[in-house]
Image (cartoon, rainbow, N blue to C red):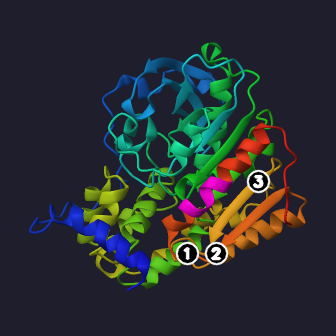
Amino acid sequence: MTSLARRLTATAALALTALVGTAVATPAASATPAYPTPLPDPFYAAPADIATKAPGDVLEVRRADTWLASGNEVWQIKYRSTNSAGEAIPAVTTVLKPVNAPADMPVLSYQAIVNSLGLQCAPSAALFTGEIKDVFGLPLALSRGWAVALPDHLGPNSAYGAAKLGGMITLDGVRAVKNVPELQFANSPVALAGYSGGGMSTAWAAALNSTYAPDVKLVGVAQGGVPANIEEMAVGLGLADRHPGFGLGFAAAIGLEREYPEKLPLGDQLTPAGLALRDEFKDECRTLLLAKGVLHGVSEVAHSTSLLQDEAVKAVMRENSIVNYPGIPTAPMFMWHGTSDPLTPYGSVAATADRYCKAGATLEFRSFPIAEHMTNAALGLPEAIQYIADRFAGLPAPSNC
């Protein structure tokens, strides 16, 4: 068993004690996506006139408080963003700002590791319950005294896996925080950072910046552990009957079905056991997705792996794989990745970095000889945060292209 498998299995064991002996009900087969249970808070609802708003327009602002951010003001902003079909959607970002901070202070949009299907797992809710699991990057960013914006980058349907969506939500979140007069960020320098699932949204925001939001000026971007090729990852999980990361792979399929219900009819391909597991997963956060998935595999939940060969399905996966997107980031960038990471293959990330370099991007790329996904996060994040600090300080960006 690999070190990754041992760690995930140990994590799963803690949660599985509550699942032993629990029978899974078999629902009626349905092609309808398993959407998350809506949060009861009306703040998250879309206004009737949202289609008349421009991306980044502020829809509602409120003050909040959380014990996880002592010494900071907490603001939540609902704004207009765009989904993968080009439709207007509501999005939310939560801003942590030091008390009595000066105007135009540095702002870091930090895309936290969410990797979940339940709406209560998103930062705007998880910051108040302790559910948020990003224990590395967020404390490092807050310790710098910057303002930190945490967008709910999976969107209003928690469409885990829909990476392009996350990029648009992130960029519109930057627009929104600059448009709230009370925050005094109108002339603030802004940077992006994120790891793993958060790195995926960060990578897409950087790549989409020049076309989707050319008005958003970024001084720097730091992204690590990025799932650069969803198709490659799906094939790897699909060919393995048991995989320690199966829960996250299955969750990503559920999330993509939510975002592309016409193109990715996952429900049509699932067995009764698969439909039951999809319903069981639909409101879960990362830890329980891993725990509940560890005893399952593709042969149990799907009629076959033929879904992976469907051209429409492949198109959805490629649309959300940064390795396939031709856009080149214009902001200086720091990337890091483990060379033997079994969850997010290194080759696609290295190929993306090489393409960026050849196109003239300013890129510092770090490779760590690490085979464990979260160890790589701990190794790279201090350097990533220092990279952002140097960009805020106006230092020239290094490049090892």
Query: Which comes sooner in the sequence, label 3 or label 1?
Result: 3
Query: Is mark 1 in CB contact (under 8 Å) with mark 2?
Result: yes
Q: Kindly indicate the quadrant of the structure image that contains residue 30.
A: bottom left
> Residue 348 vs residue 79: left or right?
right
Q: Is residue 379 magenta?
A: yes
Q: Quadrant of the N terminus?
A: bottom left
> Alpha-carbon neighbours of circle 3 within 10 Å: few (<14), some, or many (≥20)?
many
Position of the C terminus, as image quadrant, is: bottom right
Disc 3 to disc 1, C-alpha distance: 21 Å
Q: CA distance from mark 3 to mark 2?
A: 18 Å
Q: In the rendered image, which quarter is residue 209 located in?
A: top right
Residue type beneath disc 3: Met
Which amino acid is tagged 1?
A: Asp
Answer above or below: position of 167 versus 255.
above
The structure residue drawn at horizontal position 40% and vertical position 35%, both measured from the top left corner, is: 68
The residue indicated by pointer 3 is: 333
Query: Mark on residue 341?
Result: 1
- Give the x, y percent position of residue 288: 29, 59
Identify the residue under disc 2.
346
Q: Is residue 31 visible?
A: no
Mark 1 packing: few (<14 Cα in 10 Å), some, or many (20+)?
Answer: many
Image check: 167 left or right of 278?
Answer: right
- Which residue is at the front of the view, 117 or 125? 125
Identify the secondary structure beneath mark 1: loop
Q: Position of residue 350 (x, y in %)?
A: 72, 72
Would you say the residues marked 3 and 1 are in contact, meaning their CB atoms lie under 8 Å apart?
A: no
Using the image, determine if residue 196 lies above or below residue 338.
above
Q: Secondary structure at mark 3?
A: strand
Q: Secondary structure at mark 2?
A: helix
The residue lying at 62 percent from left, 20 percent from top is 101
